[in-house]
Image (cartoon, rainbow, N blue to C red):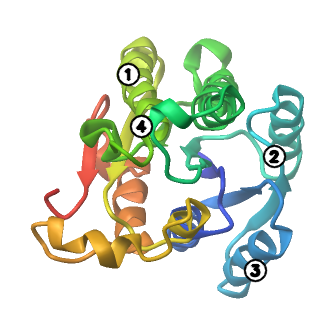
């Protein structure tokens, strides 16, 4: 089977770490980005410098027409997809639900939920044995927030990730007999740029005392779990939600 992987939001943080590690393990990687082409191009450069195969591809996952063009580009440049990591996601500035606008909520669910479903739909159409595919693996990046709720900060984000958990379980059952495994990882307090985008650049340092392991995690530690789930080593693992949260 060809090992062709799409990592949405693959230019930074967990997505970049996943792209690099997957390439080391023989995947040809499509590194998706929305705006930061420099970051995605740098990931591609590192992969190619190490002898791997990678392309950068721009698309806003919340826009169906852009997703369709992205998948067609991957088909033409790398071949039929066999792996998908639904990693693209956003937070907003910390706020109480009472202060959240509809525009904020629509953005949160359009990107974090709709984007993942649209990408998974296109991946299934390429991977499923019912569509002439050879099978594959989908890994959704959820969050420990789906269990914790993120009160006073990101309840909307937590709710979106709760939807991803439910989607993972349902899709896994739906396509299990078609050669596709579907799992999710739920990162906890991970040291990436996403916290600064939510107005809390010191969030990991401020909250690490709540983690039983007494530290935040790294993007590379999350990537290890994602790439394992993609691999043949996880051949009998589907419908699993794996917490990568230091015990929190």
- For label 1, the SS is helix
Residue appearing at x 57%, y 30% in the figure:
113
Residue appearing at x 44%, y 25% in the figure:
163
Residue appearing at x 39%, y 70% in the figure:
203
Residue appearing at x 38%, y 67% in the figure:
190
Read off the residue under disc 2: 74
Q: Is residue 166 left or right of residue 88?
A: left
Residue 114 position, x and y percent, is 64, 26
Q: Is residue 215 above or below residue 172?
A: below
Q: CA distance from mark 2 to mark 3?
A: 19 Å
* Direction left: furthest residue: 212
Q: CA distance from mark 4 to mark 3?
A: 33 Å
Read off the residue under disc 1: 166
Looking at the rendered image, the disc whose residue lies closer to the viewer, 4 or 3, is 4
Density class for disc 3 (Cα within 10 Å; few <14, some 14-19, many ≥20) is some
Q: Are marks 1 and 4 in contact (CB under 8 Å)?
A: no
Q: Is residue 234 left or right of residue 46?
A: left
Name the quadrant of the N terminus. Answer: top right
Q: CA distance from mark 3 to mark 1?
A: 34 Å
Read off the residue under disc 3: 42
Residue 112 position, x and y percent, is 58, 37
Q: Which numbered disc flags the more N-terminal residue, 1 or 2?
A: 2
Q: Which numbered disc flags the more N-terminal residue, 4 or 3?
A: 3
Residue 8: assigned label: none
Read off the residue under disc 4: 155
Q: Is residue 88 left or right of residue 227?
A: right
Residue 20 position, x and y percent, is 57, 72
């Amino acid at each position: 089977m060809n090992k062709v992987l799409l990592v949405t939001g693959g230019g930074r943080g967990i997505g970049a770490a996943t792209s690099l590690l997957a390439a080391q393990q023989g995947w040809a990687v499509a590194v998706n980005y929305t705006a930061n082409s420099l970051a995605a191009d740098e990931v591609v450069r590192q992969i190619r410098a190490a002898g791997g195969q990678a392309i950068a591809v721009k698309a806003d996952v919340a826009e169906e027409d852009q997703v369709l063009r992205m998948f067609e580009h991957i088909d033409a440049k790398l071949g039929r997809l066999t792996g998908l990591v639904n990693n693209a996601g956003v937070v907003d500035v910390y706020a109480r639900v009472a202060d959240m606008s509809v525009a904020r909520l629509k953005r949160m669910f359009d990107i974090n939920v709709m984007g993942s479903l649209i990408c998974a739909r296109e991946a299934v159409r390429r991977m499923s044995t019912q569509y002439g595919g050879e099978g594959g693996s989908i890994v959704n990046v959820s969050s420990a927030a789906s269990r914790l709720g993120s009160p006073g900060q990101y309840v909307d984000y937590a709710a979106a990730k709760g939807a991803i958990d439910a989607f993972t379980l349902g899709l896994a059952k739906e396509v299990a007999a078609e050669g596709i495994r579907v799992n999710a990882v739920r990162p906890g307090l991970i040291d990436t740029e996403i916290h600064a985008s939510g107005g809390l650049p010191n969030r990991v340092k401020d909250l690490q005392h709540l983690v039983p392991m007494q530290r935040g995690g790294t993007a590379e530690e999350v990537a290890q779990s994602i790439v394992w789930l993609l691999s043949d080593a996880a051949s009998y693992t589907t419908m699993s939600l794996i917490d990568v949260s230091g015990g929190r």
